[in-house]
Image (cartoon, coloured by chain):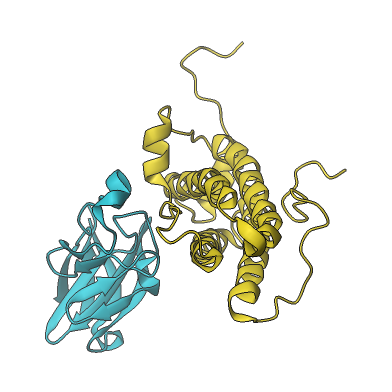
Amino acid sequence: MWFKIANVAELKNSSFIYKKAGNTHVVIGKLGPKIFAFDSRCPHKGGPLQDGTIIGRRIKCPWHGYEYDIFTGKPTLIPYPPEYGNWRKTGNLIIYDVKVRSKIVFVNIQ
Amino acid sequence: MPKKDEQPEVVGRSIIEKAGINVDQLIDKLVRGVAAELTTYYYYTILRMHLTGLEGEGLKEIAEDARLEDRMHFELMTPRIYELGGRLPSDIRKFADMAACPDAYLPKNWEDPKSILEVLLKAEQCAIRVWTEVCNLTIGKDPRTYDLAQRIVQEEVEHEAWFLELLYGRPSGHFRRRFPGEGPHSKRFPE
């Protein structure tokens, strides 16, 4: 389902905002000409990515420092060594499709 | 007599859903939070055992204060998970892997008490982040979970302050506990 989430004017380059779409909390932002949107819960242990940091095209989680590509969702940095076993495992960031119509940004939440 | 497959209305849950909380996601955060508390209790047991020597002896009781209160945090919040319709995993290994904070392993250079203090400090700082997040989600929407989470945050902040004082000389602003397990904010049944 498509949700209206923001106006294009709200999105500044290399930064993001935190919005709700239905029951889902979304981080949405802009990097160059591209708009990105992902679920605000870190796929590692559910940390609040809206309090994270954008580094290039990666989001860094404030809880444990995991980094994910904001366009593909893939983890790019797992800062814990293998001795942490299953605790360090992570899935991918949940990425949402976006579209812009009449300067309004919509996000697709399945 | 209600039928076996009939789901009762749970006003305590529906009222916070109406306030805008995704209760299943909240339950997930709470389970991860209490998993962190219980695993911390376990690891602090090991860390406390290794606070040895003249320097370590004075630190043992401070570690014990934090250890027992972290277990009390597990006891305090776990019933709330069930109240909301959640549950703990039936396998403790899965539970431990869910913990919102990393395992507080004994450092390789444990003979230096500072290395143990640094592990303790990081564990408390992680707990502050986790429970503050729960407070932020529930404030004004779920007063019961908020109340429990803020009690935990208050004690975690005090734990952090002690370890910062010991490591960096930064005044904590308050005394330690009168006795281990005092839990001034989190004790369910005050004496």
**Chain A hue?**
cyan
Task: Look at 79% across and 68% down and name the residue there.
Answer: B175
Residue A63, quarter of the rendered image = bottom left
Residue B56, quarter of the rendered image = bottom right
Side of A55 relative to B182 (left or right): left
Q: Position of residue B36 (x, y in %)?
A: 49, 49
Q: Position of residue A50 (x, y in %)?
A: 37, 71
Side of B29 relative to A32 (left or right): right
Is any part of residue B157 visible from this angle? yes
Q: Nearer the viewer, residue B82 or B184?
A: B184
Task: Look at 25% across and 65% down and name the residue there.
Answer: A38
Q: Nearer the viewer, residue B87 or B189?
A: B189
Side of A13 relative to A26 (left or right): left
Q: Position of residue A46 (x, y in %)?
A: 37, 56
Q: Position of residue B150 (x, y in %)?
A: 65, 60
Q: Which chain is yellow?
A: B
